[in-house]
Amino acid sequence: MALTHKQRRFVQEYLRSETATEAALRAGYASSSAAVMASRMMDDPDILAAIEDGQKKRLDRVDVDADYLLNRLHEEAEADLLDLYDEETGDLLPVEEWPLIWRKGLVAGVEIEALFDGRGEDRKQIGSVKKIKLSDRVRRLEAIGRHVSVNAFRDTLEFKGLDGLADRLARLSRAQSAGEAAKAAPPAEPPPAPEPTPRPKIAPKPEQAPAPPVAADWEAPKTPAPYEPILQYPERQGFADTDYENDEDGFLSARRNT
């Protein structure tokens, strides 16, 4: 069955990104339905056959497979750094005299540092130091080896394009297992009611001692008698007047009239 224009575009984009949802978006599918359409197309035998055919054609063009990577890793692992230096003088050989494996990217660059004797304009060059910077060849080869078309470093088989499907299936399986276990389990008995906490016993109040009897010699106070003076005031018989007169001789005379 012939593929539609969008399906062919999906195959092309998938060969570039290796992600089904991203390939569906680039092929023109709406963002709201890209994940669903990508999952459906990855189940379509015609689309899967087109993807596999495209991967084989790409391998034929670059001629890279797991055997190539294994041989390349072996060559780089066996490469000797001494092959870059002159055996007699110890100087770094010109690049054209390097072994081929070292010229294929093992060396990222060469830094030359001149050595001088003296200072200022009178100084003279007495030698040089050449430093070689090696490239991260292992990382580069691992990137090629992890390509979906090579599969050189894969320990497990992965299905591309089914974004999140494995997680959804795992969650569904766990939910079903939990539901079946809940149905098979006998109904849980209600927990026993907690025993009431015993209250501390209250000691009885001691009986009050009887009031002591009232002494016999005690009597209630009597009402006091009205006050009477001991000595009677004398009765006044009348009034007495006293007259004072000055005599001619200067004496004072008094006379009392009753």
Image (cartoon, helix red, strand yellow):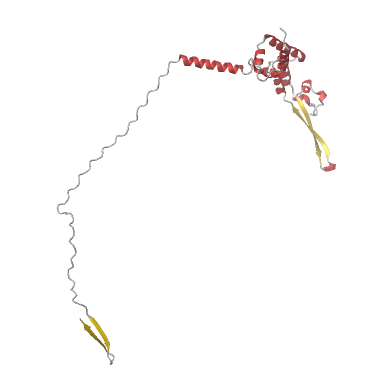
Q: Position of residue 210 (x, y in %)?
A: 20, 44
Relative to the observer, which residue lies in front, 98 or 136? 136
Position of residue 230 relative to residue 216, above or below, is: below
| Residue situated furthest right in the rendering | 121
Q: Residue furthest top?
A: 1
Q: Residue at x 47, y 14 (%)?
A: 183
Q: Of 230 and 242, which appears nearest the observer?
A: 242
Question: What x and y, as percent, mark residue 51?
Answer: 71, 12
User: In the drawing, does residue 141 fall left or right of residue 91?
Assistant: left
Residue at the (49%, 14%) spot, across then down: 180
Q: Is residue 220 above or below residue 166?
A: below
The answer to whether 224 is drawn above or below residue 46 in the figure is below
The residue positioned 52% from the left and 15% from the top of the image is 176
Residue 103 percent coordinates (x, y): 79, 23
> Taking the image as drawn, is residue 160 in sight?
no
| In this picture, residue 214 sits left or right of residue 174 | left
Residue 128, quarter of picture? top right
Q: Which residue is the extreme one toward the bottom?
A: 249
Q: Nearer the viewer, residue 146 or 236?
A: 236
